[in-house]
Amino acid sequence: MAVNRPVDGSGEVARAPRARMTGAQRRLQLIEVARGLFAERGYEGTSIEEIALRAGVSKPIVYEHFGGKEGLYVVVVDREMETLLEMVTKSLTENRSLYRIQQVALALLTYMEERTDGFQILVRGESIVSEADGESTRYGSLLNDAISQVEHLLAGDFERRGFDPSLAPLYAQALVGMVSVTAQWWLDVRTPPKEVVAAHLVNLCWNGLTRLDPDPVLVDHDYVEPSAD
């Protein structure tokens, strides 16, 4: 059965009006549009005009929600920082050390895979100071948060094993740095699968930590490696 649709004066079929977005929906749309542009072009290379055009709104709408480009950028970065930090923090508080190391690696790889635009904004390192809190938000500060948590966990492990807990910051920097740099490399090549990458990272971290020498020293030129037998 044919459905009769209203026509306008020109004889064209009239289109049903599009449902208007709520304020919250429009704000979320602008954040997602801006995230893509900031990742693609950076903060300086992105304009309010481009954000408004891609979102299909006027410039005043963007200003109404965020006050300007800086305010929108800070919101985008804050959301990405919160998402990634939540994933990393959760992985650090579950189960024993081996599983934690595995989940940290997987959390970072998963975030980079699912929110590549967001990660590119964070790692780009553009420091925009928020007038609200006077602090810049960037990937480095998130890594510092992760390092602090790993440092706390390692200090407890070192004390239980009779190692010097004052060395925990050094090992925390090394572990988080290894995972972070490897994850950034993987983002470019996307192979092998992230689960394989995480497994090999854990292999290096865990097998190294379980056989940790409490008092390592540099070897000289004449050092002879012990037999593998």
Image: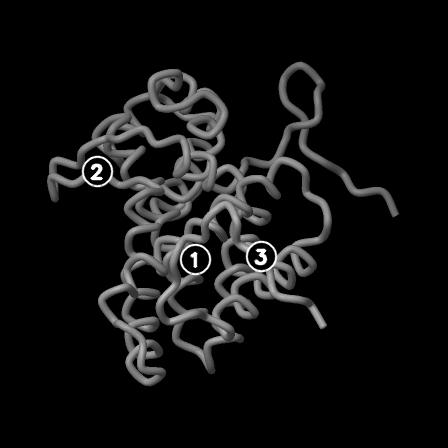
User: The residue tagged with tag 1: helix, strand or loop?
Assistant: helix
Residue with the mark numbered 1: 175
Front: mark 1 or 2: 1
Give the image location of residue 187, x and y in percent. Answer: 60, 41
Among numbered discs 1 and 2, the one appearing first in the sequence: 2
For the view shown, which residue lies furthest in the front direction? 222
Q: Nearer the viewer, residue 173 or 79?
A: 173
Which of pointers 3 and 1 lies earlier in the amino acid sequence? 1
Disc 1 crowd rating (10 Å Cα; few below 14, some 14-19, many 20+) is: some
Calculate the distance from the C-alpha at mark 2 to the C-alpha at mark 3: 50 Å
Q: Are marks 3 and 1 in contact (CB under 8 Å)?
A: no
Query: Pointer 1 and pointer 2: residues touching (CB < 8 Å)?
Result: no
Would you name the residue on which mark 3 appears? Answer: 224
Quadrant in the picture for residue 198:
bottom right
**Helix, strand or loop at mark 3:** loop
Image-quadrant location for residue 27 = top left
Observer-nearest of 24 and 223: 223
Residue annotated with mark 2: 136
Kind of residue at disc 1: Leu
| In front: label 3 or label 1 | 3
Q: Is residue 191 left or right of residue 129?
A: right
Q: Amino acid at mark 3?
A: Val
Instruction: Give the residue displayed 52% in from the left and 63% down from the top.
Output: 205
Q: Amino acid at mark 2?
A: Ser
The residue lying at 42 percent from left, 62 percent from top is 88
The kind of secondary structure element at disc 2 is: loop
Q: Residue furthest bottom?
A: 160
